[in-house]
Image (cartoon, grey):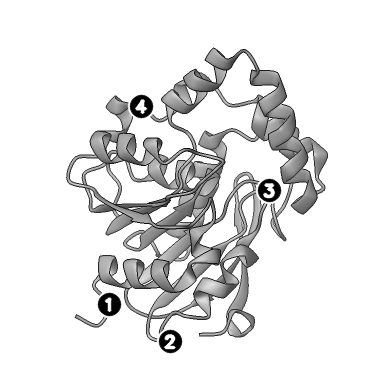
């Protein structure tokens, strides 16, 4: 399955127009990228996936070729836009694969009355403990500025990036209570050498999401789906039961 062969599609949501690429198949996996990135970050992984697997690659609001309205870029608003896309394209029963910031969004969608089949969280951001640990260092503002600078390399929309970093309400953090509301199958993938989000947080996610599976990709950093694409492909296909 070649990334370039996937169909470009747009859908209008109440927050702006979302761009995504779609290939029909069964089951379908919806991919949500990391902060400042775009759907193109999954091009290598998609190239390894079988043609029969359904794929939906999403440019999150304010990223890639999606609209970038002048709003506060909270996780809640990203969740709302993705949910509207899933409903519009009748993809509610898909799996969701989220990386980092995208995994925060995916984990938020997967709570409560989530109608999808399951969720893959790769090197996920959003855990309350992550922010608590950053605050304890006394260098939270330095951390924010570094995150902003790194994201702006890939996404030059300064307003979007700064808003996303500074506008996150604490009630949108992922906690033991909120993650316990994920009852559908969940797979947590983490790079053993992640320098952005320590692998210890993978075990916290695994503990908080009851019945979840944890896979540590040895030697991988924060973007295992790119640097260790073959390994992540195998884990994904096994999780969704493709070919079984």
Badge 2 marks a residue whose secondary structure is loop
- Could you say which is closer to the camera, residue 120 or residue 56? 120
Mark 3 touching mark 1, by CB under 8 A?
A: no
Q: CA distance from mark 3 to mark 1?
A: 30 Å
Q: CA distance from mark 1 to mark 2?
A: 11 Å
Q: Earlier in the sequence, mark 3 or mark 4?
A: 3
The residue that appears at 17% across and 46% down in the rendered structure is 211
The residue that appears at 49% across and 63% down in the rendered structure is 225
Q: What label does residue 209 carry, if any? A: none
Q: What is the x, y in percent for residue 5? A: 60, 85
In the rendered structure, the answer to whether residue 213 lies left or right of residue 142 reads: left
Count all numbered tags in the image, as a single digit: 4
Circle 4 crowding by C-alpha within 10 Å: few under 14, some 14–19, many from 20: some
Res 69 visible: no
Q: CA distance from mark 4 to mark 2?
A: 37 Å
Q: Earlier in the sequence, mark 1 or mark 2?
A: 2
Q: Earlier in the sequence, mark 4 or mark 2?
A: 2
Q: Earlier in the sequence, mark 1 or mark 4?
A: 4
In the rendered structure, the answer to whether residue 213 lies left or right of residue 72 reads: left
| Residue annotated with mark 3 | 36
| Residue annotated with mark 2 | 51
Q: 2 above or below 187?
A: below
In the rendered structure, the answer to whether residue 19 lies left or right of residue 22 reads: right
| Residue annotated with mark 4 | 175
Badge 1 marks a residue whose secondary structure is loop
Circle 3 crowding by C-alpha within 10 Å: few under 14, some 14–19, many from 20: many
Q: CA distance from mark 3 to mark 4?
A: 24 Å
- Could you say which is closer to the camera, residue 78 or residue 237? 237
| Residue annotated with mark 1 | 242
Q: What is the x, y in percent for residue 30? A: 45, 63
């Amino acid at each position: 399955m070649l990334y370039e062969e996937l169909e470009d599609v747009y859908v209008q949501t109440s927050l702006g127009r979302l761009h995504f690429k779609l290939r029909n198949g069964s089951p379908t996996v919806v991919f949500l990228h990391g902060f400042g990135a775009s759907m193109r970050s999954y091009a290598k992984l998609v190239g390894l996936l079988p043609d029969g697997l359904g794929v939906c690659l999403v440019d999150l609001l304010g990223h890639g070729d999606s609209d970038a309205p002048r709003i506060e870029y909270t996780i809640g608003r990203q969740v709302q836009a993705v949910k509207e896309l899933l409903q519009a394209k009748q993809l509610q029963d898909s799996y969701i694969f989220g990386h980092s910031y995208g995994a925060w969004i995916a984990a938020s969608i997967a709570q409560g009355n989530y109608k999808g089949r399951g969720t893959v969280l790769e090197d996920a951001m959003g855990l309350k403990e992550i922010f608590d640990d950053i605050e304890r260092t006394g260098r939270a503002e330095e951390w924010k500025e570094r995150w902003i600078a790194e994201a702006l390399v890939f996404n030059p929309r300064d307003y979007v990036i700064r808003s996303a970093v500074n506008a996150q309400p604490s009630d949108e953090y992922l906690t033991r209570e909120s993650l316990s509301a994920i009852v559908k199958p969940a797979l947590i993938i983490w790079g053993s050498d992640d320098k952005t989000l320590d692998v210890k947080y993978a075990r916290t996610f695994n503990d908080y999401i009851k019945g979840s599976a944890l896979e540590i990709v040895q030697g991988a950093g924060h973007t295992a789906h790119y640097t260790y694409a073959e390994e992540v492909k195998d884990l994904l296909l096994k999780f969704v039961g493709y070919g079984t």
